[in-house]
Amino acid sequence: MGSLPTDTMVRSVAVDPITPQRVYAAGPAGLFRSEDGGLTWTNVDDGLVGEPLAVTLYPAAPETVFVVTTDGSVWKSNDGATTWHTTGPDE
Amino acid sequence: MKRTIFTLIILTCLLTLAACTGKTNSPVASAPTRTSDSIGLAYDPATGGLLKADNQGLSRWRSDGVWEKLAMPEEAGLSGVVVNPDRPGTVYLSGPGLGILRSEDAGKSWKETNAGLPNLDVTALSLHSFRRETLYAWVQDEGIYRTEDGGETWVRVPDRGPPDRDVRGLTHSTLPGSMNTGWLYAATPTGAYLSMDCF
């Protein structure tokens, strides 16, 4: 576990509505996930190519996470940001 | 990690104190700006797709892997988009120089919902986690505003906001420990900040 890099830009924050301690933060330094409401963070963009611009969740199944990168690509994770693949949202 | 914990603790204390000593700002004129440094992203249950609000306007991610630009009442950079998950046709947009727009028909038509805002430079927008008529907006150079009637009227929240006033995103959370209904995360160029929504 670790913290967000000090003084690092965060462009977007998403919160798991079922497990609100789980928070995602996207920015130029990458995508980070917290399991304690933001006290500590883990980098979770392994396999995700590009600079994250924004992050959001599918509210009814919040282990489904979407990230848009600076080149407009959409990345989807079906396991809470553990693994990633590029995709359209309804695949 | 220690610095992050310290920052969150101090910020929470400061914002809780600020809740008791807040002020109401008077409306002021503001020259509209048309570019946005913010980006909003929302899952749209009506289509199973994504909606993106950014400096290029409003776009929908199609299943064929293309961002489709959606028609807007006027060309404007956007800062945020939120969708009411209980009424998927209800969509809100924000933008600097634009204020806040609401659509009840999945974007076919839009209504300005700015009553009470001191200016139209809205750089971030968030929907409450379970009160679907409550939204929060960050107004540049002013602070956090809240509506409890779906955008019909906005009031200043007695909260000074994060130390970094360049708020690019707001997200509501039901994280335990709040004195009210939850918390607000603010995304800024210097990091993420947390504030209690006890107002």
Image (cartoon, grey):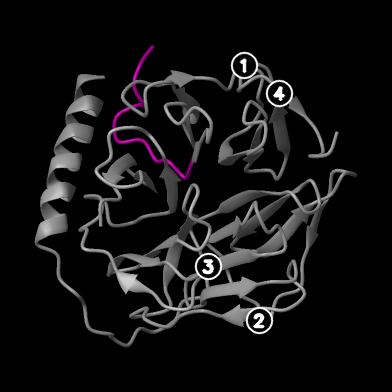
Q: Nearer the viewer, residue B77 or B143?
A: B143
Identify the amino acid type marked 3.
Answer: Ser
Q: Secondary structure at mark 4?
A: loop
Spatial CA span between label 1 and label 4: 8 Å
Asked whether, in this view, residue A27 is left or right of residue B158, the answer is: right
- Labels 3, 4: one chain: no
Residue, x 19% and y 41% (percent of image)?
A: B11
* 1 vs 2, front mark: 1
Inspect the image, locate mark 2, and give the three-letter code of the amino acid beneath it.
Glu
Query: Bounds of the magenta span?
Result: A1-13
Identify the mark at residue A82; answer none if there is no mark: 1
Q: CA distance from mark 4 to mark 2?
A: 36 Å
Magenta stretch mostly in which secondary structure? Answer: loop
> In the image, what residue occupies the spot 45% across and 59% down?
B124
Quick one: B17 or A12, which is closer to the camera?
A: B17
Mark 2 or mark 3, which is nearer to you?
3
